[in-house]
Image (cartoon, rainbow, N blue to C red):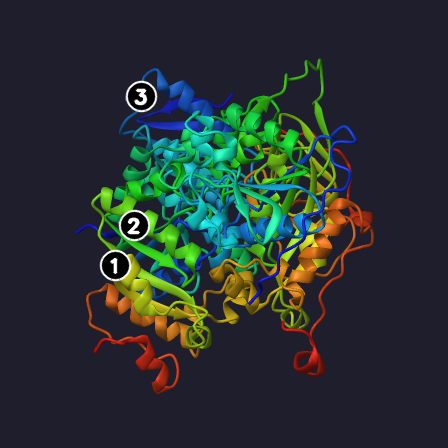
Amino acid sequence: MSARRIVLTSGKGGVGKTTTTANLGAALAKSGKRVVLVDADIGLRNLDLVLGVEKRIVFDLVEVVEGRCQLRQALIKDKRLENLSILPAAQTRDKTAISELQMAEVVEQLGALCDYVLIDCPAGIEHGFRNAIAGAGEAIVVTTPEVSAIRDADRVIGKLHERGLPVRLIINRIRPEMVRSGDMLGVDDVTEILAAELLGIVPDDEEVIDTTNKGEPIALVAESRLAAIYAKIARRLEGELVPFTALNAPGFFERLFRKAG
Amino acid sequence: MSSVRGRGRNLEIAVDRALGAAAEELRVQFAGRPDFYRGSRAVANLGLLEPPALELAAFRDALAEFGIVLDGVCGGESVAQIAAEVDLAYLGLAQVAEVAALPRKRQQREVRLSDEARSLVADFAGARADMVRRREVGPAGAATVVAAAGVAIPLQPRPVPAGVATLYHRGTLRGGQALHNLGNLVVVGDVNPGAELVASGDIVVFGALRGVAHAGAQGDRSARVIALELAPTQLRIATVIATSGADRTKRGPEHASIVDDRIVVVPFAEAELKRESHA
Amino acid sequence: MINQVIQDEVPGAGDVPRVRGRAIVVTSGKGGVGKTTTTANIGTALAALGASVVLVDADVGLRNLDIVLGLEARVRHHVLDVLEGIATLDDALVTDKRVPKLRLLAAAQTREKDDVDTAAFRDLIGTLRDRFDYVLIDCPAGIEKGFVNAIAGADEAIVVCTPEVAAVRDADRVVGLLGDDRKVELIVNRLRPALVRKGKMLSVDDVNDILHLPLLGVIAEAPDVIISTNRGQPVALDPASEVGESYRAIARRITGQDTGAPEIPREKTLFGKLFGGRS
């Protein structure tokens, strides 16, 4: 039974694709799924940093494609979660090092080894983006509630639909107080503009920067609010109907969801 | 040159160089007639070699590619423990007997490695012998510098009558850049995280080494890595891999080399700098 | 709300032969660190000082410079139209009523970065340098063709980096690709002095310990930046904004009016938070 192959993309850089890939992967692995994370950002790799495995890289995606090592040799097992592995990108190469077909083949091989392949897509919509979506069967678009991010997400969703990929949305780094003051778009606004199914809402949290610097995904910090949220996203991904968390006082909850439910 | 001799229905393989290189040699030898020895049992005579267990396992796997089953090894006393670790019979010094009749000795290996080091060793199982092989036939036979837009510019290999060429680079190496050399490497400047140095000889960084450095990349275990500030993401000498811990205190110039199968780092003032010849 | 109109200054235009304008690319490697916001604000601040400025959005297909400036409704033609001869440069240049010496050359939204010919783009930048004192190029994230196009024609670069490990790695890669022939300077963006003090964020020194670049400016994290971006009102136009002041100081350093070292924002005391400017 082959794995679900999901690309996480955004268009705009810096909205949290890599952080989301790492944390969603960790949450899925914690719930018992076998997960492989693939860093498709050749030349600007960061997924390894976010997971804290940068010192253990010996082989990478490009060397797998070029046949200089076997796939299993390049996979790095996470030390905290036995169901989680990562295939890092190369750093001393660039995105022309592999083709869409080669990427699709690697992802297919990985699909035989696990339940979920999550592909971390580079920013933009160039060659690297095309490679990243090549092996995927579904997409998650990550956006922040800012005008430029939404505009780029919209462009990307168009391209994903062109490829026939079903798209779901994660709204990242939302700040309830700014939504209230009208300085940030609310969830309803975003979903309406992008017309995509909502998978998750992740609030802004200054702890995330620190966890990224340390290589300890916040989904693994048991008491953290964000860990609970990523766990819920993982369940939703599995098909469970999980209500969205109220991020603040009831007044805020009402404002976020003008429609019922 | 390693030799393969038939003894009865079995083979004795006498090895006279590092196992990685020996395996490669044998591959070349067998390539002409890959099935000739299929189904044979073999014993390897390691002479004075004391390879790490993983290298021995990799050697066994290499033989298995040609259908040769390695049952045991002979060599120095320390080889007994190593052989037991990888489930091979130890046959003493230069002794060959009916392999099928020999008991397999299991001995507890003394735990000398820290947990982190051991897990690193496990991580890289199988990869290390491959790494040496890759470097020997690798893409960059000549020195290369990665310049603008990630395009590698090969430098002309220097013709050197004897001894090894040393590549000198002045300037900081940025993430994504790489210097590979057949010979030694000297960098005056920092080597940032994401940058890569690979040399068949020694590596010297007159600056902060924060990227990945691989000295003795073709199997020379006597190679050194020396830096004003040794804080690499990963350090490799021949087939041994290590990483620096989380401790970020600055310690001044340091020298890394292989001692007893592990990479050992000492302050430069205490380094043993005698030049060794290598097999 | 800011409804200022900056007075147009034309000091002795036409009397002195024109010195060729400076072409500066604003880049980072990592996305989301504030390249576009920085380009818009530095450009606005330079124009407010009296220089003629054109901002070029090189992010074909994912343009955002027009939004940040609040000019998206005024864009009639874009870079590709000019390069393909469909429109003249004057057709495409958008004027900002609030800042008369500022022009915008927008990117195409429905095209791809591969559509842009690097040599043609370089020539266009050359043409713009003949007409304007400053040509600021907003570079897309990444190091692909979009990046290669954006840096063509610019002999100076500003690298924008946030105090996070991933951003520093990507910035380092970009600095390596920019090569040794360009003047490259650093802006550290979105600094949070309180988090630096608590050890939860890199300091400016930590960042430049890796990047080794002359520091052009340091900008603190502030909510008014997102607000201004959403509303299309660059903070550099707001006399009460501290971030705006940081950008204005950077502009003065670029023109050479200011030669002192950049100020590093300090943690706000409670007094400062209550009675200082809007942060």
Q: Quadrant of residue C222?
A: bottom right
Q: Quadrant of residue B4?
A: top left
Q: Are marks 1 and 2 in contact (CB under 8 Å)?
A: yes
In the rendered structure, the residue with mark 1 lies on which chain? A
Residue at image coords 31%, 24%: B37
Task: Report the residue marked by disc 1.
Answer: A196
C-alpha distance separating marks 1 and 2: 8 Å
Which residue occupies the foreground of this view, C202 or C50? Answer: C50
Residue at image coords 19%, 66%: A239
> What crowding class fits label 2: few (fewer than 14 Cα within 10 Å), some (14-19), or many (20 or more)?
many
Q: Is residue B255 left or right of residue C161?
A: right
Residue B174 at x, y percent in the picture: 63, 40
Residue type (three-letter) at the residue carrying disc 1: Ala
Task: Report the residue marked by disc 3.
Answer: B34
The correct choice, above or below, for A112 with respect to B36 in the image is: below
> What crowding class fits label 1: few (fewer than 14 Cα within 10 Å), some (14-19), or many (20 or more)?
some
